[in-house]
Image (cartoon, rainbow, N blue to C red):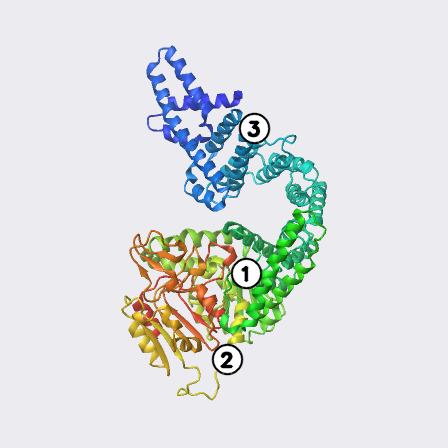
Amino acid sequence: MNEQRQQAYLNLIQSLLNCPDGEEPEILAANQDLLDADFLDVLVAVAEMMAQEGNENTANWLINLATILARYLYEPFLFLIEVLQATAESRGDAQVVYSLLAANTDKLNLLFADVLRRWATTTLEEMQPDEAEYLAAVLVLFSNRIREFPLGDKASNMEIAIAGYEIALTVYTRQALPQDWAMTQNNLGTAYSNRIQGDRAENLESAIAAYTAALEVRTRQALPQEWATTQNNLGTAYRNRIQGDRAENLESAIAAYTAALEVFTRQALPQNHAETLFNLGLLYQQEKRYTLAYNTFESAIETVESLRGEIVSGEESKRKQAEEWNALYRRMVEVCLALQEDTQAVEYIERSKTRNLVELLFTHDCYPKGEIPPEVKNQLQQLRQEIEEEKRRLEQAEQTQSFDINRSKLNQLRQQREQLMSRIIGFNPIRYSEIQNLLDEETAIIEWYIFNDCFRAFIITHDKDKPEIWPSNAEDLEKLVNWTFDEYLELYYDDKLKWRYCLHNQLTQLAEILHLDEIVSLLAGAKKIILVPHRYLHLLPIHALQLASGEYLIDKFPNGVSYAPSCQLLHFAKSKATPPSPQAGRGSNLFCNFFAIQNPTDDLEFTDIEVETIADTFHPHHILKKSAATEAALAEQPNADNFHDAHWLHFSCHGYFNFNFPLQSGLQLADTLISPIPTDAEATRLLKISDDVAIDLEKCLTLEDIFNLSFPNCRLVTLSACESGLVDFTNTSDECIGLPSGFIKAGTANVVSSLWAVDDFSTACAIGE
């Protein structure tokens, strides 16, 4: 150990000896970075010196402390052995390793990094070469996982990864195992690029050195894809470099990205192509070269949208990929605003939301199957199969270094699939003029968008060729995030009764944070507004906010306030809606087919009155009551036709939003409760509501089911159920995916839903009015 570290150990021991009784744990907690095996050695040495000087009590106290700390160090050691064994047995499977890490985040600290480094160093010294290679491989796999682990302390996670890579490099030498050495150098460079501890400038120098070393083996001739990967990484390190001449660093970054794109072409490796273009576009945006940034991001987006349904496998990879692509669209919106292309900014906001929904529909086949001719469905399945076969053929050709690597067929198949899916889903990127055509002269849209440093409200009207934009500042965004998550949502999930009593004051704060009066002042002449929220704004009752005048927003506009998940879905809903005939009187049967689900769990006392009162207004009406309201009954005749052909759908039941599996969110039907819960039950099939009671999702009407339905005549769906309007606010990639968007996609023109748990008596009274 160096002299400075040894003095720090001695200072800590002196502090522990001099502090008042009871303060020792606090001092140790504040100095966790010093609690390692060397500290124990110094502690024992000081104790021995004290004993020789006759200070037996002090010596015994120090020995006792050393014993306690030894146990403190032993726990990380046991977990290290456990997690490395799990990594080895699963071959680094993310699901296996992440579940173990998630259950032990308290152990993932700098002490763990030190234990890993010491144990691995000592163990490798005693191993045979083949055993050492195996352990080095496990260390690299584990380091890859901990580097990308989303939970715990990210600074500590990165230190653990660096320790693992650096120890592996004592086995993976350039002379003995050049490719493994180069791979680990590349990974070490990525860890140093993202390192939080230490000096940022020095970390980037270490990253550049590691990437440069990797390129000594990863040449374009020998390992073209690996070479391109490291070039891309090196470009990012130079882009962020602090030392050296800024202009030269940027030129080095551009050269590295350009080199990577020689291999990462759109035809050969489209996903890598898009990632590298994104990185290059960030450089141009950072340097305010906005036209170059626009062109680069545009090309990246076109590539991303050609990859429908081909996101890499694995839930964590999908999540990261989706969030990265969302960042791509957000950056494009920022560039459009910098270029004063405000209408294009709105179009790319909408394009991002549409991409998320279409990706979901692609992946899960969640589109109204009854509306698709069998031959079209078969054609889509055939295209998917041919794409996978062609990808496998090209993979094999690359592995055998065959000259038959022509990617034109794969690109043609992707283009055919894209065209066919656009026909099936009915979505093409919406233009600003199309959004304007949704409005009359008295209606305006307020579309919010949350950036990294602010949020903006885009105000769209029928007569103005550009949106009016209200921008917040960084402080407003910070207040909005803190209010939403630390006050509103935390109180809602912890104490719903207290939340209800505080709601008025909380919403008053929200109106101030959103600067609602300023935004409304820009809506002169509007009698109706359509709110299009973004991300967690979907969870908030913006229509119920109070203006400075004392009016509530919903009362300010005589023709009403409504919501849309996106302008794209609003356009879709409007295209499906058939206006009632002016000649149709109250006694006419036009748009009077009513279908309802009534109290399927038989525990909502006032829903019977609610449904039957409403049903009397409609003729004909069809109701599935209580135990008869099962998923199976919905598929039986004549219920299936009545359900499909209804003009008005009313669900008076329990609802839920499934944050773990959003597609399994839904409406609870009859015969769905399971108790006790079978020990071998599939986790994705059940939604636990207590230790021994769960909801069987396969017997509910889930969001995935709804995407598969078709309601060509439906004008209104009323979800008289708890939390039926929620979306996944933790996932930026599915920010507007929820039950309302599912029903709109299935063909419904309008949806009424709830943002919180509601009392069935209050709901019955509100809907009865």
Q: Residues within 10 Å of mark 2 (few under 14, many from 20)?
A: some
Q: Earlier in the sequence, mark 1 or mark 3?
A: 3
Q: Nearer the viewer, residue 588 or 380?
A: 380
**Quarter of the figure that contains the C terminus:** bottom left
Q: Earlier in the sequence, mark 2 or mark 1?
A: 1
* Residue drawn at the location 66% of the way across and 35% of the way down: 213
Identify the residue under disc 1.
Answer: 359
* Residue drawn at the location 58% of the way across and 29% of the way down: 170
Distance, label 1 to label 3, CA atoms, is 47 Å
Identify the residue under disc 2.
Answer: 578
Mark 1: which secondary structure? helix
Q: Residue furthest top?
A: 53
- Total number of numbered labels? 3
Residue 690 sits in quarter:
bottom left
Q: Which mark is residue 129?
A: 3
Asked whether, in this view, residue 31 is left or right of residue 625, the answer is right
Residue 245 sits in quarter:
top right
Q: Amino acid at mark 2?
A: Thr
Label 1 or label 3, whichever lies nearer to me, is 3
The location of residue 360, given as percent across then percent down, is 52, 61
The location of residue 755, given as percent across then percent down, is 40, 63
Mark 3: which secondary structure? helix
| Image vertical order of residue 583 relative to residue 193, above or below | below
Distance, label 2 to label 3, CA atoms, is 75 Å
Q: Residues within 10 Å of mark 3 (few under 14, many from 20)?
A: few
Label 2 or label 1, whichever lies nearer to me, is 1
Asked whether, in this view, residue 185 is left or right of residue 251, the answer is left
Distance, label 2 to label 1, CA atoms, is 28 Å
Mark 2: which secondary structure? loop
Q: Amino acid at mark 3?
A: Pro
The location of residue 735, given as percent across then percent down, is 49, 59
Question: Is residue 526 visible in the rendered structure shown here?
Answer: no
